[in-house]
Amino acid sequence: MNTATTTSPEQVRRAVLAMPMAQTLGLRFTRLEAGLAELEMPVLPAFCFRPGQLQATAVFAAADFAAVSAAATLLPQGWINATIDGTLKLLAPATGSHLRAVGRVVDAGRLLTVCAAEVYAVDPEGQQTLCATLLGTARNIDAARRSA
């Protein structure tokens, strides 16, 4: 990979955290490097279907942001990506103080990138429970060509 022509992790972080959805969810990156993204999301009452337990859509959002952000770190400069497919498997209740989502690239292609994420529910003492796994596909888009 030529790092001079690859989207930097800092560019990905800024782009993601500028999104209103990411801001509403309270996302915070804890690690972001080529092919890997780790983020945290607080368990907020607005996203719970019962007290302290997140609804599946909030869990999916954390997994999707982590996986597709990991994929974005491998894009050429000037390219963006968007989720076109994702399958979430819920493994345990998403309870605790926050979620920790770890995204990674499975296979990076020119037009499509297959990515994955594991989501952990973290309790106030720091104990982690794997609560979901996601397999996703991101469409890679040449933004300059798209806007022409």
Image (cartoon, rainbow, N blue to C red):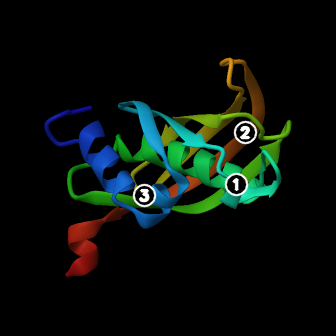
Residue in the picture at 67% in, 34% down: 97
- Crowd band around label 3 with a 10 angstrom C-alpha radius: few (<14), some (14–19), many (20+): few
* Cα gap from disc 1 to disc 3, whole angstroms: 38 Å
Secondary structure of the residue carrying tag 2 is strand
Where is residue 119? Give x, y as percent: 67, 36
Residue, disc 3:
111
Q: Quadrant of the N terminus?
A: top left
Q: Quadrant of residue 35?
A: top left
Q: Position of residue 115 (x, y in %)?
A: 56, 43
**Residue 8 seen in this snapshot:** no
Determine whether the residue tagged by mark 3 lies in a helix, strand or loop. Answer: loop
Q: Give 96 or 66, whichever is nearer the viewer.
A: 96
Type of amino acid at the residue the image marks with label 3: Leu
Quadrant of image for the C terminus: bottom left
Percent of width and height locating residue 113: 49, 49
Q: Looking at the picture, does residue 51 appear above or below residue 128?
A: below
Q: Is residue 26 above or below residue 30?
A: below
Q: Residue furthest bottom?
A: 148
In the rendered structure, the answer to whether residue 14 lies left or right of residue 97 reads left
Foreground residue among 141 and 82: 82
| Nearer the camera: disc 1 or disc 3 | 1
Query: On the image, numbered disc 1 is attached to which residue?
Result: 45
Tell me the residue at 80%/46% (across/down). 53
Instruction: Give amino acid for label 1.
Output: Pro
For residue 10, side relative to residue 119 (left or right): left
N-term-proximal mark, 2 vs 1: 1
Q: Which residue is the site of mark 2?
A: 133
- Name the image quarter holding residue 140: bottom left
Whether residues under marks 1 and 3 lie with C-beta atoms below 8 angstroms apart, the answer is no
Name the kind of residue labelled 2 in the image. Thr
Comparing marks 2 and 1, which lies closer to the viewer?
1
Q: Kindly report the distance in space between the C-alpha atoms of the residues bearing marks 2 and 3.
A: 23 Å
